[in-house]
Structure formats: C-alpha cells, structure tokens
Image (cartoon, rainbow, N blue to C red):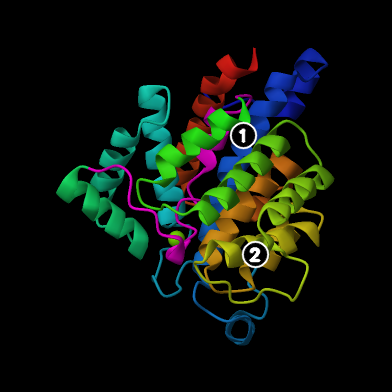
Amino acid sequence: MFVSDPRIELQRSGRLSADHLLRWRAAAAYLGLAIGDALGATVEFMTPREIHEVHGEHRDIAGGGWLRLRKGRVTDDTEMSLVLGRTILAHGRVEPQAVAEGFSDWMRTKPVDIGHTVRRGISLYRRTGTVEVPENDYDAGNGACMRCLPVALATLGAPVEEVAAANLRQSHVTHHSTLADLGTLCVIRMVQTALLGGTRTALRQLADELVAADKRYAYDRKRIENPGGYIVETLRAVFQALFSTDDFETALIDVVNRGGDADTTGAILGMIAGPLYGFDAIPRRWRRTLDADTQQACLTQSQELIALSASHRQ
Ligand SMILES: [Mg+2]
C-alpha cells in the first residue's frame, strides 16, 4: 500500500509523477504529526526552564513525562486523528454521527490522555445523541485542531467552503468556537498548500490572513513560551517556530522546547512541516523510535485519505 521511495522511483522510471510526490508528502504529514506528538509528550506541562534543567535541549523521542509514556508512544492527538480518519474512509466524507461514535469507542479504551473538552463533548453525545456541542468561545481549545489532518488530506482540492464545512462537522462534535474554527481552517489550508508544493512564504501568507481576520493570532510580538491549550497560544508558538527555522528537525525541536502543551504544538507543527520539507527531512532516529504499529497505521491511512481526495482534483 505504501508509496515507494521517490529515489527508487526516479531510478526506475527516470521521473517522479506529481501524484507520487503528493503521496510522499501526505505520508510525511501523518508521520510529522505522530513524531511531533511523541517528541512533545515528554515535556508536556513543563516550562522551558524546567526542560532545560532536566534535558538540556529536548531532542529525542524518550517517553516518560507526566503521562509516563513508553518510549515511542503517541497520545490523543495522533489517536484521535486515526479514529477520525477511519470514519472518513468508512463513509467517504466527514460524517459527524460516525465521528462521535468513533470518539466514544475510543474513550472506552481508556486512552492514556484525553482533554477535558473532548471528554465533555463525548459525554454529551452519549447522553443526548447530539453531534454538535453548544457554542462556547470561552474555551477555544486546540483539541479539534490537533486532529484535523485527516480532513486536510481527504478534502485536498475541494473548494475552501467545502473544506471548512467538513472541518466544522468534525470539530463541533467536541469543540465549538468561531475563534478555534478559524485557526483550525488555517492549519488545514497550510497543510494542503504544503502538500501541493507550496513554499514557506505561501504558508506565511495564510498565517498572515488569519491574523488579518483576527488580531488575537498575531505572532510577531513576544516569544511564546509555555503555550497552554488555548488555540491562539498554540498557533502563535507553532507559527513562530515554523517561520524562524528552515528545516523539519530544527522547527520541531524549537516548538517542543517551549514546553506547555508541547505534544499538541509538536503535532500541529509536524503535520505542516512534514509536507513542507518532505519525507527525507524527517530524522531517521525519530522514525526508528516511533511505535511501529502507529507508524504503519499513519502511513497507510495517509495514502488511503489522499486517494479519497482524488475526486476533488480531477
Ligand atoms: Mg496529547
């Protein structure tokens, strides 16, 4: 199922098709998400100072942290993405009822970590059957953004209104905030732009459009350290790290060493920087350490979701 290495493909056929490159970048996006999650989890809820005292610079997937993770394991960011992706593949689109059912089944497995807003949304679904929680801008959390990658892959090439609507159908199962919806759509568009070969400058334009739409996202002021679960803090940290570095490894190390909600800043940065810099830019030592079953699930799903998007791109 997994797309063959572009270098081998080049040797074999002398050229690399646009489709092959796209599939390779999709794989890098999903792997970037999982690696960012696994790397950041070790230092989640730590301050940059605490990280420095314990790890110097945190650079290796090591497990541990407050969740006492096994080395290579991921958290809810990757797990919920995989659940969402499975429901999209089963229904051919984002089907909120299936998403809610999938999340509810996942919660039954006693996940290693689960956000407060996610738990509340799933509990409401179980009690009332609703697949859209009430609007609440007070807690514009990052929990719907951290799992948005399957939407970005499956809707690549669709009109932006359709992409936005698909995202709301998954986000509102647990999170309903105009501010968070805006930030999540920006991340999805950044991933999609990178998948199609867009540069860092093109991604920066999207971030700046977001800031123009809502000034709270302005990321050019003071350095964000210890970002919390508030999506504005999350994305400001991600943008600062992404736009002040020029390779996958440096960008990811930058963002997780800011501490705070480091698994989620890592996951979001990883899903953008993966397709931006390409599969080969992901350090081998991180790929070797990432849990093998998770890695396989991410790679397989990336290929199935990008195949699903082909109908939008004809
Ligand atoms: Mg997490």
Is ligand 1 less than 8 Å from the beta carbon at label 2? no
Q: Residue 157 in magenta?
A: yes
| Foreground pick, 191 / 205 | 205
Discs 2/1, front: 2
Image height of 14 relative to 159, above or below: above
| Foreground pick, 15 / 289 | 15
The alpha-carbon separation of the residues under discs 2 and 1 comes to 30 Å
Q: Residue 271 in magenta?
A: no
Instruction: State the image quarter where residue 115 is shown.
Output: bottom left
In percent of the image, x 49 and y 39: which residue is there? 167
The amino acid type found where label 1 is placed reads: Ala
| Foreground pick, 309 / 130 | 130
- Is there any visible trace of residue 299 in the rendered image? no
Q: Residue 26 carries which label?
A: 1
Q: Residue 216 carries which label?
A: 2
Instruction: State the image quarter where residue 130 is shown.
Output: top left
The amino acid type found where label 2 is placed reads: Arg
* For residue 309, side relative to residue 124 (left or right): right
Image height of 62 relative to 242, above or below: below
Label 2 neighbour load within 10 Å: few <14, some 14-19, many 20+: few
Mark 2 element type:
helix
Image location of residue 298, percent across then percent down: 49, 39
Q: Where in the image, quadrant-wise, is ligand 1 located? A: bottom left
- Is there any visible trace of residue 141 in the rendered image? yes
Sequence order check, earlier mark of 2 and 1: 1
